[in-house]
């Protein structure tokens, strides 16, 4: 069933809006996917953000010409970048060609390079602004300024969740990425659709999720919640369009149900020692393992940020990328392998992205001491996709000979988000919400689905 949300009244609650749109089908039918516009290839999404700006020419976009002209000025003059840069700098890492599909990947991802038959690399990404905050807003919310709903919130609004006992949209990070909560906010969408953020700094679910351990018997809790529910409904009856209140009521209901299922779902210690070792005994590996456990249990979207602030922002020394990749590679590779072995890979979409790329030239500004790093680059970068209907063993688009600017089959953030929504069964032009006098959507007024990277 195809349902357009273009005419939703801005003051309707989600429940009222969905009931009106469904024509009597009710909330459950909608939440189970009645709003899809076509048959989805993916049911769930794991979005991994290497926040800080991963360098494309040191990871997924090999450039022989960069090696050939190492130490020389870029032809045509130095690139226009945020900071002062000098001559071209070759990658300090070798690239390894996958023996089957031929995709080349940096040696800093040894396990992931063997799985490129399952992956597509978009090498022609570009964005608007070479600053972390607006670029993070763009990949998450489809705009460079705050105040727009996040991708996860749009998915929750359009598709709902498959497991009422767990949050449908979970965000994991050992710390807080630059910008923080606005990156997983529901903004003007009903508040119930915002992401649930967890500082993934412990293996103990009772430390990871505060107040999840019951403080009284189940019977006593039910009596308390029954009274609270009655009072909340009376309050809501007097304020029928208060989505914040409705979200609070829903959150309390979910929190009560989570006491049963969450301690098991979030406890990675229940995995074998061998499994935990494969993912890596660190916060990022634990996040990848936890993401797998959550999507197994019906969580719609899990977003993973690599670390606090912007760890991939390596202005001074690009060799830091190798240390960061020692955590990334085992976690991502194990996630792909396990989803395949459990039969979940084909309908779970994995995105490995970053807010922008880095320059092919060395940064030489006064604030840099080592001068072996790269500046921000919004003109060209790479994103890796796998599972969920993605055509594996492929690359799409290209940057110029030095990896600075996307020149072939250029792919903008709106195009990527349109493709993600398409794979989830949603027409990005139809999933809209009327707010402040206009219809908003994740892709604003642009975006085209990249059909070339999708399986027939």
Image: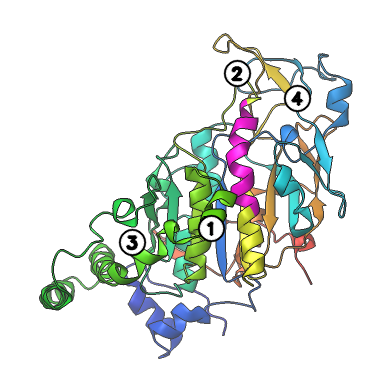
First in sequence: mark 2 vs mark 1: 2
First in sequence: mark 3 vs mark 4: 4
**152 vs 131: above or below:** below
- Please say whether residue 263 is visible from this viewpoint: yes
Identified at 22% across, 73% down, the residue is 240
Q: Position of residue 253 (x, y in %)?
A: 26, 71
Q: Distance between the residues labelled 3 and 4?
A: 46 Å
For marks 2 and 1, give the one nearer the viewer.
Answer: 2
Q: Do the residues labelled 2 and 1 touch (CB within 8 Å)?
A: no
**406 vs 346: above or below:** above
Label 3 residue SS: helix
- Residue occupied by mark 3: 191
| Nearest to the observer: residue 128 or residue 264 | 264
Q: Position of residue 429 (x, y in %)?
A: 59, 66
Label 4 residue SS: loop
Identified at 67% across, 33% down, the residue is 55
- Residue occupied by mark 4: 92
Q: What is the crowding at mark 1: few (fewer than 14 residues within 10 Å), some, or many (at least 20)?
A: many
Question: Where is residue 401, by image quadrant?
Answer: top right
Identified at 71% across, 48% down, the residue is 112
**199 vs 254: above or below:** above
- Residue occupied by mark 1: 442
| Nearest to the observer: residue 221 or residue 187 | 221
Res. 316 mark: 2
Q: How far apart are marks 2 and 1 (CA)?
A: 35 Å
Label 1 residue SS: loop
Q: How far apart are marks 4 and 1 (CA)?
A: 38 Å
| Residue 331 highlighted magenta (yes or no) | yes
- Please say whether residue 414 is visible from this viewpoint: no
Q: Which residues, given as a range, are shown in magenta? A: 320-333
């Amino acid at each position: 069933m195809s349902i357009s949300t273009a005419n939703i009244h801005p003051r309707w609650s989600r429940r009222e809006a969905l009931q009106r749109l469904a024509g009597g089908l009710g909330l459950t039918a909608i939440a189970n996917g009645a709003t899809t516009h076509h048959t989805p290839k993916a049911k769930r999404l794991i979005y991994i953000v290497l926040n800080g700006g991963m360098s494309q020419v040191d990871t997924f976009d090999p450039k022989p010409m960069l090696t050939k002209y190492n130490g020389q000025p870029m032809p045509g003059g130095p690139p226009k970048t945020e900071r002062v840069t000098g001559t071209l700098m070759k990658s300090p890492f070798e690239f390894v060609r996958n023996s089957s599909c031929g995709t080349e990947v940096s040696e800093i991802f040894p396990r992931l390079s063997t799985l490129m038959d399952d992956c597509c690399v978009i090498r022609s990404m570009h964005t608007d602004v070479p600053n972390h905050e607006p670029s993070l807003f763009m990949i998450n919310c489809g705009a460079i300024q705050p105040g727009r709903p996040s991708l996860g919130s749009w998915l929750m609004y359009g598709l709902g969740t498959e497991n009422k006992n767990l949050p449908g949209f979970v965000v994991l990070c050992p710390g807080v990425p630059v910008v923080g909560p606005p990156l997983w906010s529901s903004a003007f969408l009903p508040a119930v659709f915002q992401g649930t953020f967890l500082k993934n700094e412990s293996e103990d679910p009772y430390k990871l999720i505060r107040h999840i351990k019951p403080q009284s018997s189940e019977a006593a809790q039910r009596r308390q919640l029954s009274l609270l529910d009655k009072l909340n409904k009376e309050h809501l009856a007097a304020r029928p369009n208060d989505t914040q209140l409705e979200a609070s009521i829903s959150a309390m209901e979910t929190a009560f149900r989570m006491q049963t299922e969450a301690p098991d779902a979030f406890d990675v210690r229940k995995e074998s020692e061998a499994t935990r070792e494969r993912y890596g005994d660190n916060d990022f590996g634990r996040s990848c393992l936890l993401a797998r456990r959550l999507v197994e249990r019906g969580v719609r979207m899990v977003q993973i940020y690599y670390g606090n602030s912007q760890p991939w922002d390596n202005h001074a020394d690009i060799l830091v990328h190798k240390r960061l990749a020692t955590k990334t590679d085992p976690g991502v590779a194990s996630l792909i392998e396990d989803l395949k072995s459990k039969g979940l890979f084909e309908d779970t979409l994995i995105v490995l992205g970053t807010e922008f790329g880095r320059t092919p030239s060395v940064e030489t500004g006064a604030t840099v001491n080592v001068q072996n790093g790269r500046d921000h680059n919004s003109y060209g970068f790479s994103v890796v996709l796998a599972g969920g209907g993605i055509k594996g063993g492929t690359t799409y688009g290209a940057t110029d000979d030095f990896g600075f600017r996307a020149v072939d089959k250029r792919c903008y953030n709106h195009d990527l988000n349109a493709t993600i929504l398409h794979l989830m069964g949603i027409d990005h032009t139809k999933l809209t919400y009327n707010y402040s006098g206009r219809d908003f959507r994740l892709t604003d007024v642009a975006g085209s689905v990249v059909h070339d990277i999708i399986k027939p």
